[in-house]
Amino acid sequence: MAFEDIKAAIDLLMNEIVAKPEDSHVLQEQLREKIAELRALGLPVPADLKQFEDALSGAGDDEDGDDFDNMPV
């Protein structure tokens, strides 16, 4: 698949994430697959997609159990 085809598919996924937030988890995984496809083909990953991917991977990364540190006891 050519760069423009993958980029078009990514744009569709981004629009679908906005339109269907209840399905965003599945759509985000599809987006990650498209970004991986770009990398596998040696194609450049646009900076905005890298930032979005970093934001997705950082979301929910609070695994140290401190989710409620600011809760009064």
Image (spheres, rainbow, N blue to C red):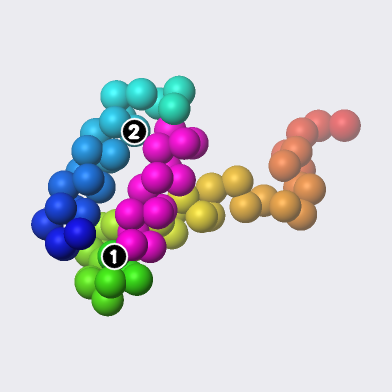
Q: Which residue is depicted at the point 43% across and 33% down?
A: 24
Q: Which residue is depicted at the point 26% across and 58% down?
A: 48
> Per the image, is 33 magenta?
yes
Could one spot residue 34 in this view of the protein?
yes
Q: Position of residue 22 (x, y in %)?
A: 45, 23
Crowding at dot 1, Cα within 10 Å, few <14 / some 14-19 / many 20+, comes out as: some
The answer to which quarter of the image holds residue 68 is: top right
Question: Which residue is disc 2 drawn over?
Answer: 17
**Please, is residue 67 above or below residue 7 in the view?**
above
> Per the image, is 31 magenta?
yes
Q: Tell me the CA gap for discs 1 and 2.
A: 20 Å
Q: Which residues are magenta?
A: 24-37
Find residue 67 and name its label: none
Crowding at dot 2, Cα within 10 Å, few <14 / some 14-19 / many 20+, comes out as: some
Task: Give the mark nearest the N terminus, 1 or 2.
Answer: 2
* Picture quarter with the N terminus: bottom left
Q: Amino acid under label 1?
A: Leu
Question: Which residue is disc 1 drawn over?
Answer: 38
The dominant secondary structure in magenta is: helix
Could one spot residue 51 in this view of the protein?
no
Nearest to viewer (mark 1 / mark 2): 1
* Picture quarter with the C terminus: top right
Q: Viewer-proximal residue, 64 or 10?
A: 10
- Disc 1 is placed on an element classified as helix
Q: Amino acid under label 2?
A: Ile
Q: Viewer-proximal residue, 19 or 39?
A: 39
The answer to which quarter of the image holds residue 21 is: top left
Residue 21 relative to residue 42: left or right:
right
